[in-house]
Amino acid sequence: MAEKSFYNYRVEPQDVDFTLRATIPSLGAAILNTAGADAHGKGFGVDALNADNHSWVLSRMAVEFDRLPGQYTDYTVATWINEYGRVLSTRNFTLTDAAGTEFGRAVTQWAMIDLKTRSAVDLSWVGDAHADAIVDAPSPTDKPRKVRAVQPTLTSEHRVAYSDIDFNRHVNTMRYIEMMFDMLPFELLTEEAPVRLDMHFLRESRYGQTLTVGCELRGREALFEIRADAETVAVRASVAWN
């Protein structure tokens, strides 16, 4: 049975906003970079999968932050896989500061796709081949929650450009988050309060498509629905402040 892996980071100036605290997209990027580095180190990273024309794609994600660390804060991201299913793999994370105090956690669920057909493939062989990568530890918080009906009261449009695209040639997760957060009022984004973000990825968004970002505010919660070319729902998400 495997052990958790640990990766060290620092909140750099490009990671903060005008409050000099880390942004959620910058911490989210560190979380996903950790996933990639750990998978690579264990032999089932994107580089290995690409040889068979496969790749990992994020299907669902939940992140929680009790607080957002300030500029130049050193922190550690721990990660571990505790579950392989036929369709999804569950990878977990905790974030702790230099004093060892946990300030964030995440649960992500990943699918594997065939890069030619863009369809999901059976993960059973990964679980069998890499059973020694599974850690006997529970997820640090609830798995990603599904966001169902969204009735947007605010909308904006975004045409997918070069800077939005990741190595899978679809819109990067952090760009989705930035699009959503740009629609929120300053007082929510800058408030020092615990926050949880849930995202459910339903379809890919590709270069050249026009995205419609819809937002429904419900007090201290914001619900989002992102549609591609005004029809297909690509992403649903919620952000809630405690």
Image (cartoon, rainbow, N blue to C red):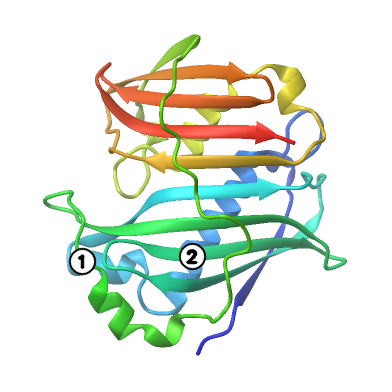
Which residue is pictured at 39% across the width and 25% down the height? 226
Q: Secondary structure at mark 1?
A: loop
Which residue is pictured at 65% across the width and 33% down the height? 240
> In the image as oriented, which residue stretches furthest toward the left?
117
Q: Is residue 202 visible?
A: yes
Give the x, y percent position of residue 125: 24, 78
Q: Amino acid at mark 1?
A: Asp
Which residue is pictured at 37% across the width and 41% down the height? 201
- Residue 171 or residue 108, whichever sits in front: 108
- The alpha-carbon separation of the residues under discs 2 and 1 comes to 17 Å
Check disc 1: other Cα within 10 Å, few if <14, some if 14-19, many if 20+: few
- Residue 65 or residue 240, whichever sits in front: 240
Q: Which quadrant of the figure has residue 4?
A: bottom right
* For residue 57, side relative to residue 156 (left or right): left
Q: Secondary structure at mark 2?
A: strand
Q: Which residue is mark 1?
A: 122
Give the x, y percent position of residue 80: 54, 72
* For residue 156, side relative to residue 9 (left or right): left
Q: Is residue 183 visible?
A: no
Q: Amino acid at mark 2?
A: Arg
Is tag 2's residue or tag 1's residue first in the polypeptide sequence? 2
- Residue 198 or residue 155, whichever sits in front: 198
Q: Which residue is mark 2?
A: 91
> In the image as oriented, which residue stretches furthest toward the right?
99
Which residue is pictured at 34% across the width and 61% down the height? 88
Give the x, y percent position of residue 193: 79, 36
The relative height of residue 199 versus residue 183 in the rendered view (above or below) is below
Check disc 2: other Cα within 10 Å, few if <14, some if 14-19, many if 20+: many
The relative height of residue 176 versus residue 132 in the rendered view (above or below) is above
